[in-house]
């Protein structure tokens, strides 16, 4: 038994060492001089869903479109339309890098801003659960359309797929409108390239190299970008492609391939991005706060114009979610001016104690030099312990020089009554933590059976809150128990559906 325990400890330590080694490597993976082909072909990672294959089968039946452009060479690298080559490392995330790179190019061409977007955001947060085991490019486009893309500097690449989604901790800097399919046809792809680079697929057989490799198509297993064409290379012409194997491979990370070789051009897609001169986003830093307390939030304005923009922004508080203009409780105007680039401002709303617990929202909107902008944040106000209720008597908007919330550290550990109670579907549970401790928050039914664990981790002191989603359990009386070291407190709540 001792030998087994020792062996398990050694294996676990070695596994952890390898994981940490990869994590350390990936911090600089965009600059790393990469690897041999034999190493890299293990980490292609394309998965083409059957539905996508059927869709493209129909699209490829269309006749070849007429190409009106007569240029025999088109290269977005020479027109400042391509961002730097990166490396996917030891992770099958080619699909991620190809589509993310296409989005970076679309924005660079439209706005002139060379955003370095986060591939790790996609791995951690995509709706399909794709990761280092492979994926499809539409997972990137769907996330960047419906949520938006964040910067690599905020969400760095790890070349791993077991991390939780943390995109809420970063500002959204890019949001695409949609994406389109491009038929597997040289003219069709050239027409799309006149707008911006595209993401596409190909097969990577044994012996593949970067300089006009010729091979018949068998099955796509890798995704790359096509950034241009040259009718005078590779015999009868070929594509100029951007890979995700680092700058140490190929021609500084790029390669050239004959039209149709290895099936290049199958399943080609292109993001649709519209130039937006001014972008306004807001991030709530205290989505649940105590009655009579402060709502902390951050406002980000991206000015893509060449000069200052100015105007009046109105900060409004609404009863209910989603910033219904018919439920405005307060509106506070502010005159603002923003220089070109990205500007972040931090604020907090002092909310009067008279505002009862419930669901609320805050909107910011207005006109900046002719550009209409707006954003909305949903929040919950909870009934907390009396000592935690602030003495705000009126609405006030305060701008601060940093985004941190200046909340008092609790002097005692205590569990508050959940809100609302009774509740339907979701309830907010708040508690105070006086010192850094191991915290466990569990839910039990009337029979004493545990139905869920909401918190099981070590936490720093502060005012805490968590939302319990009870949509999968039946109506009835439930108990929630807070355990902090030797301290235990139990309260009850009623679920009514």
Image (cartoon, grey):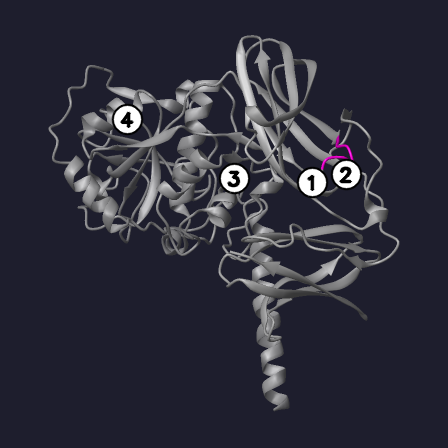
Q: Nearer the viewer, mark 4 or mark 3?
A: 3
Q: Is residue 62 left or right of residue 50?
A: left
User: Label 4 belongs to which residue?
Assistant: 229
Q: Nearer the viewer, mark 1 or mark 2?
A: 1
Q: Does residue 195 lie above or below 121 as drawn?
A: above
Residue drawn at the location 59% of the way across and 35% of the way down: 320
Point out the tag, 1 or 2, that comes first from the N-terminus: 1
In terms of secondary structure, where does tag 3 sit?
loop
Asked whether 9 or 287 is in front, the reply is 287
Which residue is located at x 28 percent, y 25 percent?
192
Please state which of the two labelled residues, at mark 4 or mark 2, is closer to the viewer.
2
Quarter where residue 429 is shown:
bottom right
**Image spot of residue 237 (x, y percent):** 21, 28
Q: Nearer the viewer, residue 154 or 189?
A: 154
Q: Are marks 4 and 2 in contact (CB under 8 Å)?
A: no
Q: CA distance from mark 2 to mark 3?
A: 26 Å
Q: Quadrant of the N terminus?
A: bottom right
Name the spot of residue 486 as percent of width and height, x first.
81, 71
Q: Which residues are magenta?
A: 350-355
Query: Which residue is identified by label 3?
Result: 118
Residue 37 lies, with reference to residue 179, above or below; the image says: below
Per the image, label 4 sits on a secondary structure element best described as: strand
- Residue at mark 4 to residue at mark 2: CA–CA distance: 52 Å
Q: Are marks 1 and 2 in contact (CB under 8 Å)?
A: yes
Reading the chain from its start, which is encountered first: label 4 or label 2? 4
Residue of label 1: 286
């Amino acid at each position: 038994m001792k030998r087994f325990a020792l062996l398990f400890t050694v294996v676990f330590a070695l596994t952890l060492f390898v994981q940490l080694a990869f994590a350390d490597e990936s911090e600089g993976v965009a600059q790393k001089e990469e690897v041999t082909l034999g190493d890299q072909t293990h980490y292609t990672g394309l998965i083409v869903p059957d539905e996508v294959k059927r869709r493209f089968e129909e699209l490829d039946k269309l006749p070849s479109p007429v190409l009106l452009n007569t240029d025999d060479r088109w290269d977005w690298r020479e027109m400042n339309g391509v961002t730097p080559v990166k490396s996917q490392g030891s992770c099958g995330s080619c699909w991620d890098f190809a589509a993310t790179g296409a989005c970076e190019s679309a924005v660079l061409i439209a706005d002139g801003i060379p955003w370095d977007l986060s591939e790790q955001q996609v791995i951690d947060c995509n709706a399909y659960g794709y990761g280092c085991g492979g994926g499809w490019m539409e997972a990137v486009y769907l996330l960047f359309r419906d949520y938006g893309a964040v910067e690599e500097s905020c969400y760095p690449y790890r070349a791993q797929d077991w991390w939780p989604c943390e995109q809420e901790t970063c500002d959204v800097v890019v949001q695409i409108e949609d994406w389109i399919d491009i038929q597997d046809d040289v003219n069709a792809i050239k027409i799309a390239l006149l707008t911006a680079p595209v993401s596409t697929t190909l097969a990577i057989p044994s012996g593949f190299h970067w300089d006009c490799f010729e091979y018949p198509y068998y099955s796509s297993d890798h995704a790359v970008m096509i950034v241009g064409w040259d009718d005078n290379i590779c015999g009868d012409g070929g594509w100029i492609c951007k890979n995700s194997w680092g700058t140490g491979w190929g021609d500084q990370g790029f390669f050239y391939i004959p039209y149709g070789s290895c099936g290049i051009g199958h399943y080609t897609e292109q993001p649709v991005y519209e130039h937006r001169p001014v972008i306004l986003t807001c991030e709530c830093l205290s989505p649940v706060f105590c009655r009579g307390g402060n709502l902390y939030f951050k406002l980000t304005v991206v000015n893509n114009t060449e000069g200052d923009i100015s105007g009046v922004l109105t900060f409004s508080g609404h009863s209910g979610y989603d910033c219904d203009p018919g439920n405005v409780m307060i509106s506070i105007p502010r005159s603002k001016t923003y220089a070109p680039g990205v500007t972040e401002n931090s604020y907090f709303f002092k909310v009067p104690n008279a505002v009862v617990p419930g669901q609320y929202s805050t909107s910011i909107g207005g006109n900046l030099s002719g550009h209409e902008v707006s954003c909305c944040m949903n929040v919950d106000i909870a009934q907390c312990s009396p000592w935690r209720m602030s003495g705000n008597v009126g609405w006030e908007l305060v701008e601060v020089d940093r985004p941190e919330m200046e909340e008092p550290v609790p002097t005692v550990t205590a569990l508050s009554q959940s809100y609302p109670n009774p509740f339907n579907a979701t309830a907010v549970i708040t508690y105070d933590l006086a010192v850094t401790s191991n915290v466990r928050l569990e839910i039990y039914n009337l029979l004493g059976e545990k139905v869920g664990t909401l918190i099981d981790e070590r936490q720093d002191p502060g005012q805490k809150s968590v939302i319990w989603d009870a949509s999968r359990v039946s109506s009835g009386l439930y108990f929630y128990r807070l355990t902090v070291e030797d301290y235990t407190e139990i309260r009850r709540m009623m679920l009514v559906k």
